[in-house]
Image (cartoon, helix red, strand yellow):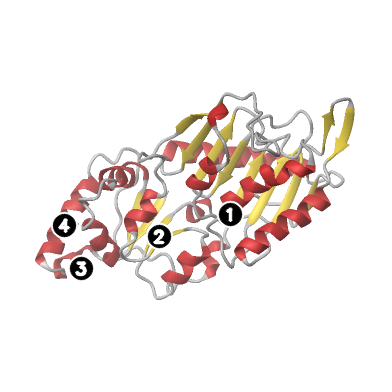
């Protein structure tokens, strides 16, 4: 992952040294991010003495024991200024999973869109903290059967341009239960999104067995309902694509977004219409891309999905919907 940082934001973050999550956030930056400062190092010498000392102390912390991360670079000319929504429309996975701590005239608007992790001056800890799972940049396992709702997803959701769901049985339930499971999950993941079209891709089986009866998934109806729900929350209709899985492909239950990944020991349809957890699964994992190894796994998984998409492109109605994604090419 890359972190693009302006001087004003570095100064602000350096002042946060006394906050509880500062050590975890700084270690995460040091060990997992390729840091790109957008200014020349000599500009630090123009800062007031106290700010200069705080910044240099932070630079020393970020520079040592960086593992496999790149060396810190200075005077980096990215992203283009002033910031625009064009930054969301790219297939560069590095840009789509970077964090942007920037002092830009349009930064408030970029934050408002809820597409990528942007921080205006003074909010650096909040943005970096979004990548922590219970205070740590690592995977956290939860007992699936203890879950009473989808708050683990909602509370750990990050701004995103794209949501990719892989679950053969995502819609293998009564359509009356979608609002308790499938729809609620997507809405929880999209909670930051505002005024910019979100790309949603769902890999799932086109039919399922209900007792002794085979039932088709009603993709057209689901598409209309899901788009309507996201439109009501974000103010813009999402781009929605369904990839019909062959029965022998993809048995995992995983969700990938720009900064997080979730996986489950059971299909994401835990709850009945009374809100009771009826799943027989055992575990639910929340992963952060603030850990570079997790991000590598997510990128590799997306490549596997791209290979699957390539195999299905010639099939009749194997891929339906808007066919729009920054992570996958249709």
Secondary element at tag 4 = helix
User: Cα distance, mark 1 to mark 2?
Assistant: 20 Å
Q: Who's the residue at 22% across and 57% down the image?
A: 14
Residue matched to label 4: 54
State which tag comes first along the sequence, 2 or 4: 4
Mark 3 and mark 4 in contact? Answer it, CB < 8 Å: no
Residue matched to label 3: 43
State which tag comes first along the sequence, 3 or 4: 3
Q: How many marks?
A: 4
Name the front one of labels 3 and 1. 1
State which tag comes first along the sequence, 3 or 2: 3
Q: Which mark is residue 190?
A: 1
Name the front one of labels 3 and 4. 4
Q: Quadrant of residue 193?
A: bottom right
User: Cα distance, mark 1 to mark 4?
Assistant: 37 Å
User: Cα distance, mark 3 to mark 2?
Assistant: 20 Å
Q: Who's the residue at 23% across and 62% down the image?
A: 11
State which tag comes first along the sequence, 1 or 2: 2
Name the front one of labels 1 and 4. 1
Q: Position of residue 168 (x, y in %)?
A: 72, 34
Query: 198 and 151: which one is in front?
Result: 151
């Amino acid at each position: 992952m890359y972190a693009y940082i302006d001087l004003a934001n570095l100064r602000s973050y350096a002042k946060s040294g006394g906050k509880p999550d500062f050590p975890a956030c700084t270690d995460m930056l040091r060990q997992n991010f390729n840091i790109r400062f957008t200014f020349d190092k000599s500009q630090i010498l123009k800062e007031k003495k106290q700010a200069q000392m705080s910044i240099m102390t932070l630079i020393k912390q970020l520079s040592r024991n960086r593992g496999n991360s790149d060396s810190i670079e200075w005077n980096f000319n990215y992203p283009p200024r002033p910031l625009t929504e064009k930054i969301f429309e790219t297939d560069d996975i590095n840009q789509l999973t970077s964090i942007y701590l920037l002092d830009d005239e349009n930064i408030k608007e970029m934050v408002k869109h809820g597409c990528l992790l942007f921080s205006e001056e003074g909010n650096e800890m909040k943005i970096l903290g979004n990548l922590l799972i219970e205070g740590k940049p690592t995977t956290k396992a939860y007992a699936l059967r203890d879950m009473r709702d989808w708050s683990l997803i909602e509370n750990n959701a990050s701004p995103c341009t794209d949501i990719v769901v892989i679950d053969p049985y995502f819609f293998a339930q009564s359509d009356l239960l979608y609002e308790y499971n499938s729809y609620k999950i997507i809405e929880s993941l999209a909670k930051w999104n505002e005024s910019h079209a979100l790309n949603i891709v769902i890999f799932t089986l086109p039919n399922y067995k209900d007792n002794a009866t085979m039932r088709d998934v009603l993709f057209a109806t689901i598409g209309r309902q899901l788009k309507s729900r996201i439109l009501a929350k974000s103010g813009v209709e999402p781009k929605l694509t369904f990839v019909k899985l062959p029965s022998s492909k993809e048995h995992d239950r995983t969700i990938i977004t720009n900064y997080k990944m979730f996986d489950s020991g059971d299909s994401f349809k835990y709850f009945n219409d009374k809100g009771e957890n009826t799943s027989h699964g055992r575990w639910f994992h929340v992963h952060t891309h603030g850990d570079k190894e997790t991000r590598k796994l997510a990128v590799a998984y997306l490549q596997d999905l791209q290979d699957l998409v390539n195999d299905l492109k010639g099939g009749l109605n194997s891929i339906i919907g808007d066919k729009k994604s920054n992570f996958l090419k249709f």
